[in-house]
Image (spheres, helix red, strand yellow):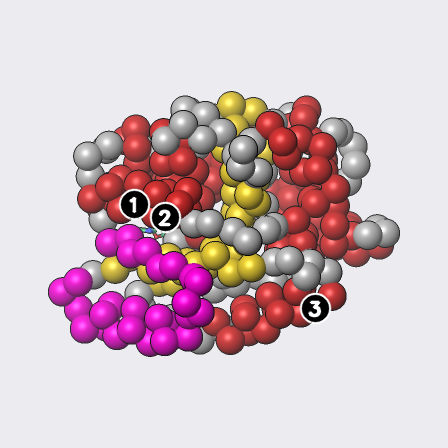
Amino acid sequence: MSKVRVIAVVNQKGGVGKTTTVVNLSACLGEAGKKVLVIDADAQGNTTSGLGLEKNKLENTLYNVLLGEISISDAIQQTVAENVDIVPSNMNLSGAEIELVSLEDRESIVKENLSKIKNNYDFIVIDCPPSLGIVTINALVAADTVLVPVQCEYFALEGMEQLFHTIGLVQNNLNADLQIEGVVFTMYDSRTNLSIEVVEEVKKVLKPDMYSAIIPRNVRLGEAPSYGLPITIYDTKSKGAESYRLLAEMVIDKEWK
Ligand SMILES: Nc1ncnc2c1ncn2[C@@H]1O[C@H](COP(=O)(O)OP(=O)(O)OP(=O)(O)O)[C@@H](O)[C@H]1O
Ligand SMILES: [Mg+2]
């Protein structure tokens, strides 16, 4: 019997494809029969709306869980995707960065809460905000592994150093078991040398046990969120859907010591 794996999808750079990866990887894991819980840890709430929930009509969100107002099981909802549940978020969460500062054990609130419901799932996937603040640190403390989306663009490597430094700090101080799972190259365009170069450069710094997956730039992936649907439902035969299925296979097949 395999145990649950908690995956934090992290990159402090904005707009690199974190949310697109969380929504569609989770949907593909669910499609493959895995039980998935998504944690939307970003106040933008794009994962919440991308999985079909109305983010402005939520009673119970991650914010209420973090402040200890409700238990995590009261915040869990079903999504449009098969086998995928979510702890949703909306703008409320933007206050958390400040409000959590005064709390004891403020780095491990997400971990504490997940411990109560973890065993109901095969995978827990956390969408992080584009910052390395207290909410992202909570995700890294709760996580078994980190998955880093890298956009195939200029300056893709900029910020990677800071990210790996932060991951190192968390490993040294808060979560010694944290491992980097792999890199997802997003918005890849095989017609441009730039995309090819970014992949080559980043692969040079990956350890042998890390995998890398390529997600092409695909119009359907960009459209799906406005319908509140993951790509597996919006256009199940698209290149985007196929590429996220391949990523899901890598995630499932990856073995951990
Ligand atoms: N493979 C892709 N093909 C086409 N469009 C994509 C792809 N991946 C992401 N996008 C689009 O790029 C934009 C940024 O993606 P996304 O929201 O997933 O990034 P993010 O890292 O979560 O951003 P933020 O840092 O603001 O949370 C979105 O409009 C999304 O639809
Ligand atoms: Mg996002």
Q: Residue at x 26, y 40 (%)?
A: 241
Q: Residue at x 70, y 45 (%)?
A: 111
Residue 76 belongs to the span the image colors magenta: no
Give the left or right position of residue 227, taking residue 39 as reference: left
* Residue 6 spot, x, y in % from top left: 57, 45
Q: Quadrant where the N terminus lies?
A: top right
Is residue 184 among what the camera can see? yes
Marks 2 & 1, CB-CB < 8 Å contact: yes
What amino acid is at disc 3?
Asn
Q: Which residue is mark 1?
A: 246
Q: Residue at x 23, y 33 (%)?
A: 235
Disc 3 CB within 8 Å of nearest ligand 1 atom:
no
* Residue found at the far left of this picture: 191
Between 179 and 89, which is closer to the camera in this rendering? 179
Q: Which residue is mark 2?
A: 250
Q: Which residue is mark 3?
A: 172
Residue 144, placed above or below residue 235? below
Instruction: Using the numbered discs, state the Cα–Cα distance from disc 3 to disc 1 in whole angstroms.
Output: 32 Å
Residue 204 belongs to the span the image colors magenta: yes
The residue segment tinted magenta is 190-216
